Amino acid sequence: MPIHSTWCDTKKTIFHLQLAGDWTWEEYVRSQIKLIESNEFQTFPIKIIIDFTDSNNKREKTMALFKKTGQEAPQIIAHVVIVGNAFVRAMVTLGKRLNATINYPIDTASSVEDALQLMGA
């Protein structure tokens, strides 16, 4: 599966979702279910890094599908940072302007290290 997910810290407060190669929306949804199930009893907020650095996915409706998952996200999500190239970061910025209904703050970064810094890690 070209979507890999790991915790960045032992306290399980920062989740790193790496989308590599050609991934499908079914794989993305499964990764979100894995995150939710692994936090079934967690009461404190988590932060998520969605890393497009190695992604080849150029599917239509990507923004709409991310919007839908963002609107339906569990309340435990406190912050999302999307990592990607200049095009990905521009699309996220545009999406934020057009869709103010996401349930958590979203930022962009050019590397995972920059994302961790934005999250205060």
Image: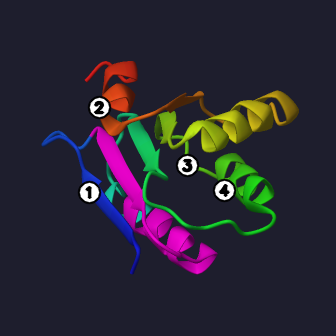
Q: CA distance from mark 4 to mark 3?
A: 10 Å
The range drawn in magenta is: 13-35
Comparing labels 2 and 4, the label whose residue is closer to the camera? 2
Q: Is residue 10 or residue 83 the one in the foreground?
A: 83
Picture coordinates of residue 113, whole percent (x, y): 29, 31
Q: Are marks 4 and 3 in contact (CB under 8 Å)?
A: no
Q: Are marks 3 and 2 in contact (CB under 8 Å)?
A: no
The label shown at residue 69 is: 4
The label shown at residue 74 is: 3
Residue in view at x 66 percent, y 48 percent:
70
Quick one: label 4 or label 3, which is nearer the N terminus? 4
Q: Secondary structure at mark 2?
A: helix
Q: Residue furthest right?
A: 98
Q: CA distance from mark 3 to mark 2?
A: 25 Å
Picture coordinates of residue 60, whole percent (x, y): 80, 67
In magenta segment, residue 3: no
Label 3 neighbourhood size at 10 Å, few (<14), some (14-19), many (20+)?
some
Quick one: label 3 or label 2, which is nearer the N terminus? 3
Q: Amino acid at mark 3?
A: Pro
Quick one: label 2 or label 4, which is nearer the N terminus? 4
Q: Are marks 4 and 1 in contact (CB under 8 Å)?
A: no
Q: CA distance from mark 3 to mark 1?
A: 18 Å
Picture coordinates of residue 44, whole percent (x, y): 35, 34
Q: Amino acid at mark 1?
A: Thr
Q: Are marks 1 and 2 in contact (CB under 8 Å)?
A: no
Residue that badge 1 annotates? 6
Residue that badge 2 annotates? 113
